[in-house]
Amino acid sequence: MEEVSKSQCLRCSGAMQAIGVEKIQLGQTGLLLGMWRNVFAGSLEVDIHICTECGKIEFYSTHSNTYFDDELPKRTCPQCGSVHDFDFPKCPSCKYEY
């Protein structure tokens, strides 16, 4: 996999400036449970860079090239029994809506 340069904008090739590290909340807000679904979904720490020319913002994982799918909480569909990420609004196998 080719390493993406954090110093050059992907849109206009302008200079990128680091503006900080933040945690992005994973999950979604629902009508029934409100923000409680987000509590269990976790967060992802990202490095934020902004282009000094066009203003495009880029997010980069603070972890080295690892795929985070295994770290996300999982849920089991009560209808078909398939296991998938907690933040899916419906089962990808049988389309059961939570």
Image (tube, grey):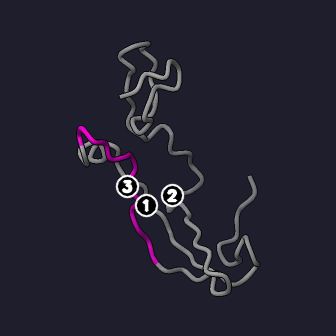
Secondary-structure class at tag 1:
strand
Seen in the image, is 95 located left or right of residue 2? left
Q: Which residue is mark 2?
A: 63
Residue 28 painted magenta: yes
- The residue under the point 42% across, 14% down is 81
Residue 42 painted magenta: no
Q: Is residue 31 above or below residue 21?
A: above
| Type of amino acid at the residue the image marks with label 1 | Glu
Q: Quadrant of residue 89?
A: top left
Q: Position of residue 66 (x, y in %)?
A: 56, 48
- The residue under the point 50% across, 62% down is 62
Q: Which residue is mark 1?
A: 45
Q: Position of residue 59 (x, y in %)?
A: 55, 65
Seen in the image, is 26 located left or right of residue 50? left
Question: Label 1 to label 3, Cα distance in Å?
Answer: 9 Å
Q: Position of residue 7 (x, y in %)?
A: 67, 78
- The residue under the point 70% across, 70% down is 5
Q: Which residue is mark 3?
A: 25
| Type of amino acid at the residue the image marks with label 3 | Gln
Secondary-structure class at tag 2:
loop
Q: Is residue 95 above or below residue 57?
A: above
Crowding at dot 3, Cα within 10 Å, few <14 / some 14-19 / many 20+, comes out as: few
Q: Quadrant of residue 85?
A: top left
| Type of amino acid at the residue the image marks with label 2 | His
- The numbered mark, 1 or 3, whose residue comes first in the sequence reads 3
Question: Label 2 to label 1, Cα distance in Å?
Answer: 8 Å
- The image's mark for residue 24 is none
